[in-house]
């Protein structure tokens, strides 16, 4: 069952049934100021940090779901309704929610009144616009009443939902003209306030939640709206809100437009006050003036659309497969930008108060957006590397506000260092900008300990070399990519974090996943060394890589697949010897991608085993069989019910590793089959089961051993976005930036006739046409660049600012 | 306006209008297992620790308020209603909620069906009973459907409301017969589960919230109830709930009774499983069997009532003032027991996840319950003292589960140590048990560093002596009793805690409040030393006390009142020289109670100044004028809006200090006037303004400079309970345990003719009659004990197990 449709021309998903199986959301904002908004107007707004600067309140896991947000009430006679359906849930004559690129449009109609709400955050602006257009589509004069509603959070989202003995006393607002100012704690330590304005005179307002809604009423039954008249309340403590009240008269066919703005203002200490206890409203008024007409709003909206046209114009494809095209051209790229902005902080599954920027996450996210915003990618790499230690080890997370490592979570996730080689090499391949390697980058955020960025890569490489276990395989530390495989934890206290507890000395438990990762990015490190003339270092590094390959072959192969790990006791994990968890996806992915033992057939065997044991209708599960009991020596992984999360769930992030692995042995049909199983646009028809948005990837789909296989959770903020984009564009479609040019070596379904891609690369536009006359999956017969055939698969760096024509004939 | 009435015979407050101005709650449970329940069935249950063992989910600051709890739905034809009004909010023919001593009864009736729900936790039991009686009061046969509802929390309340990317995957239940078992995380590190049962066969059940309620519905509109039929769902992840479905047929006049139980079970590791993935239900079944009939339930209920008869029987009064009697005899004592159980952890204002046991709080709470449960009081004193350091300094809080000091909050609240002298001396006076002083009590929870408890008192005393400032007054450290007076903090970062940040060296800021406290309990310490023969120590201590008295007179007197403090710069706080915060209540209270400068008239002047500057219609405000701007050198106190909390609010905890001060100079009218201003039973008629329960004290009432003077917040968990009980019984009524007997020296309103009190003391019953023929406030003319007149005001320790008759004639 579908709840809407893709409007690819407008780059929108259009929801036509408000009762989606779960709230389907969108993200507004692209830099400092962000909103989450659901298809019924639920969600919240924050400035930079979803924990420390929450502008509006949101209640997670609420009943009804997603209750609370930015709402409008239209009172038309005795009928009250909302253009986004919620909160009133009055049945509408028509309902439509269009989630676009950083904007959302609601359109609702009832009894001859049509209301459209366009919601977006102008570029570079610290405020959210709601353009509300109310139109009389009837043949009679309409007199209606419009009420707006938002609820302020008292800034720190965690404190806001726990510390009531203080917070019920602190709320403060001011109202002047049509603007409601929220100034809680501005008197003391805050240099910021927020406001909610409308560009026209109002007939009333409310700022006290209890007065507006009524203590025992819900958002769907507010007192003030029922009574049809604001109370003009000024909140003192309890829960400040902002609601405007506007009486509207419309002639038949007439439309009126209103511009609402939720803004955020910071002021210098010296400029905080206009007069005693009266805040300085000048900066707010300046913001309001910027968008006080529909024309100004429309201009900003068009600017935003152009911004996204440019971002999404850098890679576009025409494959003949509609569902694929909309993923690559629109939604997958869009999601990559959202993960760049949010990391794992704020979604409808991430509450915005728990997690900083992950070292590992951020490096991987980068491969999804480096082509769009290379300058910011470089900045991000430096931020990440600055938190590393001299020995190559890393804080597992860092704080977005301070950019410092998060000591509370600590480090010792032994895969972390290697991801820096991935992000750096991908950045250089995309941009050609080797100067990054020379940039002086601090260790542990201490500028006095800065070294060239290359030294960080070297430290990363040798952190593995210097931390090998009994089988000469990499020690796992607290965990590797799978945060939940905690081989040195041994926790039996439910109040302990698996990620920060480590009872055992970590000198035995080893990870085959890190081994594959090391071979993969060890080779990349060797290449980089050679490119910058560090040949001795390259030679030495190659020895370490070779040793690792040998160690994997000798101690990491289980007969039909790669082992997952050795545990604290030196016992195998992910072996046919095990009763549960016989095979895991991660080591198959990484050792295949790294082509370890490919010549002996290990890669093919491994991938065949994945097909046989891990694949199912909805994707590739993480491990099989799932654990049914707790293994204290494995940690969190065995705590999940079978089929969920890292215990036999389809953890989508790792599925592309298998797709890429398949392309290493030329199996384009298999690779693409895996791609379509988890790509959301392909799942639109089963939305009722899939539950979350059909336009973005989720972290996890319940696996074959789950109660409800195919049900997905934790959409939006997942490394799944970048890895799938990377796999489809660079390995399946096969257009891959390299140091000397653009490599084109597709590995596609054999039934395809080919495809087209337009790609910006090093300042030039590559118009690529791939032809597959023989219906094979892999193999380039001819490569023609601007009419001339060249050798190999790498298109050289072509003249900037020009369009170039490339034909690839497979065969 | 009133919303109910006091039923003193039953020791109940009876709410007859469900729409109270705020949820009015009660506490169930007396030892390990607790519930909070509002007058409409909202609230939650936990085992021992409201953060780490939350059995049911609760959403604070919800819209509607208090939405979510333990609910029943009665479907009678097309009408659905709830006996506690919520969640359905269907208008009832009759509604009544009786909050009694550790139990609550709901009675609702609609269309000829009457339902009573009796809710309580049997003594020593880890389960809550709901006895549901459904009666047909009509003349026709009634066929109705009963649905129960609770929502499970996933144990750790903080994690439960933030960590959805994990938690939406982990929920697990089992259903067998009429019992729904919640076993999330039991598979791994938890040794406990919970269950919800009913003692009869059921027609269906649900355990998946979304299935029961519907994604877009509220608690007031559940799908299953609407459809009139359970779906028999088994929850896998998301939000497990428990709902039973029972079809009931009732003849005219017939009643049927059902016993529901929400229980908590711990099992040994070896006994966790019945079979693979099937939990061991034996202990649950044993619990259920204990209360599987109405007779067993009624017996346990009667046992609970007898338990409270005994507890409350230890002190009873008959003053002729109904409102006073119900405070002293019932509600104030009841609240003191609740604060003993809860400290400051879980109320409708304290979210149960933020705070441990306060060192200061717990010592003070003890003076409210030591007469009821002296053994547990002694245990509590030892727990508290065990967290102290050898130099007398203290952790500010300790954890109830581990009983260890909370390093995250730290120490250096320099009043903390002295409260230990208060609790210890009050304990010994009540019990005569000097052996406590010899008990070996650890420092910093290290048994190897244990010393006799007396050494802890000595360390406490000298911690002040060793930490004096420039005026020889006590250094304040992070703060004194007023956590918000942070004189060494200087914070301008809103994400810093005022309580844990200290930027400045604390060797200048001094507290007059601690000075008064030191003189008060320094004298007590001297007395104790003498009693146990430590005369040299007594002599030395007396010198320190005298020095402090001199220091206060010299540097702590502002002309008309005592100063509050000296700040970091050595400037006065609470002086006529200040523009705001000229006078504070704490130093007036403590220096008056300690009678510093009484002979020179300072106490009287101070108290007159309190009357003039701090008193208002609703009580005594903390400071005046309230601060209107942030003083970085004062800390949190100046962050609150004027009139709220510690900034000009009526912080009820400190009002009794003034009452006691007034009794020191014999002003019984003033003392009692202050008492009645904040005693909740006296405020019943203004419930609409007062907002919170009229049967328990709250922490704070908005002061005269507030937007809404008289509006109260943060009811239940406050030192207000114990201090008011202490002030009214021991200083106004004047019946005060002393080492050698029971001192009787009332200071009452002059218009009173006298009063009666029955008091258990050292195993004997003292039947006291006080006569005030001359209508004075203070002065004992005759003291007659068992018919014989004795000298002085102290009734000696009388024969155990006997009743003794005491007459006091004032004059």
Image: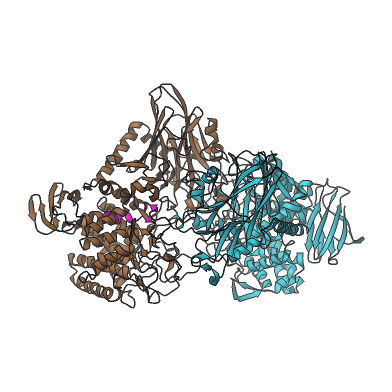
Chain colours: A cyan, B brown
Q: Residue furthest left?
A: B788
The part of the image, by quadrant, that contains residue B719 is: bottom left
Q: Which residues are magenta?
A: B700-727
**Above or below: residue A329 compared with residue B506:** above
User: Is B313 positioned to the left or the right of A621 in the image?
Assistant: left
Q: Is residue A545 visible?
A: no
**Residue A752 coordinates in the image, percent (x, y):** 83, 47
**Image quarter (top left, top right, bottom left or bottom right) of the N terminus of chain B:** top left
Residue A231, image x, y percentages: 51, 50
- Image coordinates of residue A615 in percent, x first then y, are 69, 45
Magenta highlight on residue A431: no
- Judged left or right of residue B672, residue A685 is right
- A463 or A368: nearer the viewer: A368
Report whether B783 appears left or right of B220: left
Can you say whether B530 is above or below A296 in the image?
A: below
Confirm whether the magenta stretch covers residue B714: yes
| Residue B656 in sight in this render | yes
Rendered position, B361 above or below A643: below
Estimate the x, y position of residue B535 in percent, counting from the top left. 18, 70
Location of the C terminus of chain B (image quadrant): bottom left
Q: Is residue B589 left or right of residue A520?
A: left
Q: Tell which of B739 and B22 is nearer to you.
A: B22
Q: How many marks?
A: 0
């Amino acid at each position: 069952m579908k709840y809407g449709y893709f409007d690819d021309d407008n780059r929108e998903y259009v929801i036509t049934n408000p009762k989606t199986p779960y709230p389907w959301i969108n993200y507004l904002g692209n830099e400092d100021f962000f909103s989450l908004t659901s298809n019924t107007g639920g969600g919240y707004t924050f400035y930079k940090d979803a924990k420390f600067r929450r502008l509006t309140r949101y209640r997670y896991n609420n009943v009804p779901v997603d209750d609370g947000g930015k709402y409008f009430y239209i009172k038309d006679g005795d009928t009250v309704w909302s253009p986004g359906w919620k909160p009133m849930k009055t049945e509408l004559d028509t309902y439509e929610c269009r989630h676009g690129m950083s904007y959302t449009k609601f359109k609702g109609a009832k009894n001859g009144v049509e209301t459209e709400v366009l919601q977006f955050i102008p570029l570079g602006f610290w405020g959210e616009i709601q353009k509300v257009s109310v139109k009389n589509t009837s043949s009679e004069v309409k007199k209606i009443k419009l009420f707006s509603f938002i609820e302020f959070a008292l800034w720190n989202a965690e404190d806001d939902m726990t510390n009531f003995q203080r917070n019920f006393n602190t709320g403060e607002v001011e109202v002047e003209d049509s603007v409601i100012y929220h100034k809680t704690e501005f008197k003391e330590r805050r240099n910021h306030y927020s406001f909610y304005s409308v560009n026209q005179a109002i007939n009333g307002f409310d700022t006290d939640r209890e007065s507006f809604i009524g203590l025992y009423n819900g958002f769907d039954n507010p007192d003030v709206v029922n009574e049809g008249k604001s109370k003009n309340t000024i909140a003192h403590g309890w829960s400040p809100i902002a609601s405007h009240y506007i009486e509207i008269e419309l002639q038949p066919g007439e439309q009126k437009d209103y511009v609402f703005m939720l803004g955020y203002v910071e002021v210098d200490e010296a400029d905080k006050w206009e007069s005693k206890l009266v805040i300085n409203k000048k900066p707010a008024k300046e913001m309001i003036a910027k968008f006080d007409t529909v024309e100004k709003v429309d201009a900003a909206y068009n600017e935003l659309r152009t911004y996204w046209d440019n971002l999404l114009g850098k890679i576009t494809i025409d494959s003949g497969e509609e569902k694929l095209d909309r993923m690559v051209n629109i939604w997958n790229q869009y999601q990559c930008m959202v993960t760049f902005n949010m990391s794992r902080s704020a979604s409808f599954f991430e509450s915005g108060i728990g997690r900083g920027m992950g070292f590992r996450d951020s490096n991987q996210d980068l491969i999804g957006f480096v082509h769009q915003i290379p300058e910011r990618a470089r900045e991000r790499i430096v931020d990440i590397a600055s938190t590393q230690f001299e020995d190559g080890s890393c804080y597992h997370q860092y704080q977005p506000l301070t950019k410092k490592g998060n000591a509370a979570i600590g480090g010792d996730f032994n895969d972390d260092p290697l991801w820096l080689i991935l992000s750096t090499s991908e950045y250089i391949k995309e941009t050609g900008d080797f100067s990054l390697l020379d940039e002086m980058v601090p260790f542990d955020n201490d500028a006095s300990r800065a070294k060239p960025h290359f030294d960080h890569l070297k430290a990363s490489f040798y952190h593995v070399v210097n931390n090998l276990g009994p089988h000469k395989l990499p020690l796992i530390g607290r965990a590797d990519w799978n945060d939940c495989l905690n081989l040195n934890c041994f926790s039996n206290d439910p109040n302990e974090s698996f990620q920060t507890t480590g009872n055992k000395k970590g000198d035995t438990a080893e990870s085959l996943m890190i081994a594959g990762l090391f071979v993969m990015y060890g080779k990349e490190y060797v290449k980089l060394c050679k490119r910058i003339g560090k040949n001795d270092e390259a030679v030495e590094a190659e020895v370490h890589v070779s040793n690792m390959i040998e160690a994997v072959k000798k101690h990491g192969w289980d007969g039909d697949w790669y082992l997952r790990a050795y545990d604290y006791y030196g016992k195998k994990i992910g072996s046919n010897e095990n009763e549960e968890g016989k095979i895991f996806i991660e080591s198959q992915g990484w050792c295949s991608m790294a082509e370890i033992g490919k010549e002996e057939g290990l890669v093919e065997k491994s991938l065949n085993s994945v097909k046989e044991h891990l694949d199912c209708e909805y994707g590739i599960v993480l491990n099989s069989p799932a654990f049914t009991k707790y293994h204290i020596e494995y940690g969190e992984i065995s705590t999940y019910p079978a089929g969920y999360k890292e215990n036999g769930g389809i953890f989508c992030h790792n599925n592309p590793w298998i797709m890429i692995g398949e392309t290493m042995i030329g199996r384009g049909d298999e690779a693409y089959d895996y791609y379509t199983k988890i790509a959301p646009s392909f799942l639109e028809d089963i939305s009722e089961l899939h539950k979350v948005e059909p336009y973005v990837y989720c972290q996890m789909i319940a696996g074959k051993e789950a109660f409800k296989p195919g049900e997905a959770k934790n959409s939006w903020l997942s490394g799944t976005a970048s890895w799938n984009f990377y796999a489809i564009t660079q390995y399946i479609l096969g257009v891959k930036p390299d140091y000397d040019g653009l490599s084109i070596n597709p590995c596609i379904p054999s039934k395809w006739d080919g495809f087209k891609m337009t790609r910006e690369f090093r300042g030039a536009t590559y118009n690529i046409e791939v032809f597959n006359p023989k219906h094979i999956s892999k193999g380039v017969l001819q490569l023609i660049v601007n009419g001339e055939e060249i050798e190999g698969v790498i298109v050289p760096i072509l003249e900037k600012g020009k369009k170039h024509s490339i034909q690839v004939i497979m065969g």
